[in-house]
Amino acid sequence: MSNPHDERKVTREGIHIDREVADAVAIEDELDSNLVGPYVFPDPSRRRVPAAIYAVLSVVVAVVIHPIPALLPAALAIWHLLAAWPLTIDPEGALSAAAKAVPFSIGHASAAVTFHGLRARPRWSVILYSASEPPDQRALVVVDALSGQTIGDTYVEDVPPV
């Protein structure tokens, strides 16, 4: 007689939390696997809100205490305002721009936002794999998140066979 556990196939497609469990523990929307929809990266222009808060704090400190200690929140307000870039290129746009920069057809790909320089200008770091199975090439392309232009040289390498 065969063991029933040997015949059972377990397939996992990501983490799944039962709806009842998610509701019972009041799981946050970002962690709830039952919610389906596109992920939208938070726009760095949201930095205008803390810039306004720091500016108000700076004025309050200058009036109530002294102007010298008000310089720190004023400097933070200026930096947050200068770093509040609007994210004009979404991940799909970054993937499209990166695909044009590589010499192979694209299979799997992933994009992550990074920030560069003192003003924290947003950039997409895009990793691309060739469409062959298994992939025989991969590339790293950096795309400006404001203009959609590729930045620097595209790094392409062969994937060693497994």
Image: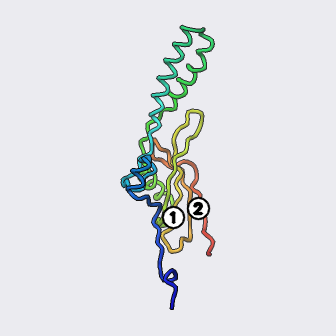
| Amino acid type shown at disc 1 | Pro
- SS assignment at label 1: loop
- Residue 17, image x, y percentages: 43, 58
| Amino acid type shown at disc 2 | Val
Q: Is residue 97 left or right of residue 58?
A: left
Please identify the quadrant where the C terminus is shown. Answer: bottom right
In the image, what residue occupies the spot 48% across and 74% down? 10
Crowding around mark 2 (Cα neighbors within 10 Å: few <14, some 14 to 19, many 20+) is: some
Which residue ends up furthest to the bottom in the rendered image?
Answer: 1
- Frontmost of labels 2 and 1 is 2
25, above or below 78, in the image:
below
Crowding around mark 1 (Cα neighbors within 10 Å: few <14, some 14 to 19, many 20+) is: few
- Asked whether 147 or 128 is in front, the reply is 128
- Residue 6, image x, y percentages: 52, 82
- Asked whether 65 or 124 is in front, the reply is 65
How are the colours assigned in the image? rainbow
In the image, what residue occupies the spot 52% across and 45% down? 123
In the image, what residue occupies the spot 49% across and 17% down? 56
Do the numbered discs 2 and 1 sit on residues whose CB atoms are within 8 Å? yes
Instruction: Look at mark 2 in the image and give the residue it sits on.
Output: 156
User: Could you say which disc has been placed on residue 43 in the image?
Assistant: none
How far apart are labels 2 and 1 at the CA level?
9 Å
- SS assignment at label 2: strand
Instruction: Look at mark 1 in the image and give the residue it sits on.
Output: 103
Q: Would you identify the image quadrant in which residue 72 lies? A: top right
Q: Earlier in the sequence, mark 2 or mark 1?
A: 1
Count of labels in the image? 2
- Asked whether 15 or 83 is in front, the reply is 15
- Residue 113, image x, y percentages: 51, 47
Q: Would you identify the image quadrant in which residue 154 lies? A: bottom right
- Residue 77, image x, y percentages: 53, 23
117, above or below 32, in the image:
above
